[in-house]
Image (cartoon, rainbow, N blue to C red):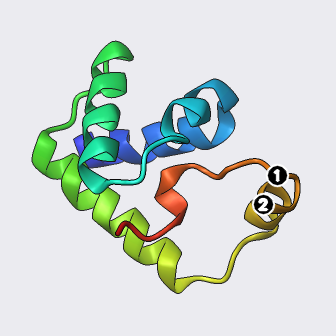
Amino acid sequence: MSVAQLETFYQEVLQDKALQERFKPLTERESVVALVMNIGRERNYDFTLEEVEAKVDEWNSYNSEQELSDELLESISGGVNIICFHFRFR
C-alpha cells in the first residue's frame, strides 16, 4: 500500500508548484529522501524510509534513461527548475 502512496505523492508533487519549490534547491539523494519523508508525514502518507529510498532511486533511474517529456522541456525552456526526481544525482 505504501508504494502506491509514493506514486500518489509523486503525482501530487508534479501538480503542486509550491511542493516543487521545496525540492528545487536539492541536489543530493539523501536530501530528497529526507524531504519526501518529511512532506509525507505532514500529509499523512504512510511509507518507510526504505520504500522512499528505493522509489527515489527508481524515479531517478527511470527519468535518466528517458527522453525529456514535453512537460519537462517546457519547464526547462521557461527557465523553471524541474524537481529533483528528473535528473541524476551526483
CA gap, disc 1 and disc 2: 5 Å
Towards the viewer: 87 or 69: 87
The reply to whether callout 1 and callout 2 are in contact (CB within 8 Å) is yes
Residue that badge 1 annotates: 79
Mark number displayed over residue 30: none
| Residue at image location 21% in from the left, 54% down from the top | 53
| Residue at image location 85% in from the left, 60% down from the top | 74
- 78 left or right of 8? right
Disc 2 residue crowd, few under 14, some 14–19, many 20+, Cα 10 Å: few
Q: Position of residue 83 (x, y in %)?
A: 57, 49
Disc 1 marks a residue whose amino acid type is Gly
Q: Position of residue 34 (x, y in %)?
A: 25, 36
- 73 left or right of 45? right
Disc 1 residue crowd, few under 14, some 14–19, many 20+, Cα 10 Å: few
Q: Is residue 1 visible?
A: no
Secondary structure beneath disc 2?
helix
| Residue at image location 34% in from the left, 36% down from the top | 36
Count of labels shown? 2
Disc 2 marks a residue whose amino acid type is Ile
Q: In what quadrant of the picture does the C terminus appear?
A: bottom left
Residue that badge 2 annotates: 76
- 54 left or right of 70? left
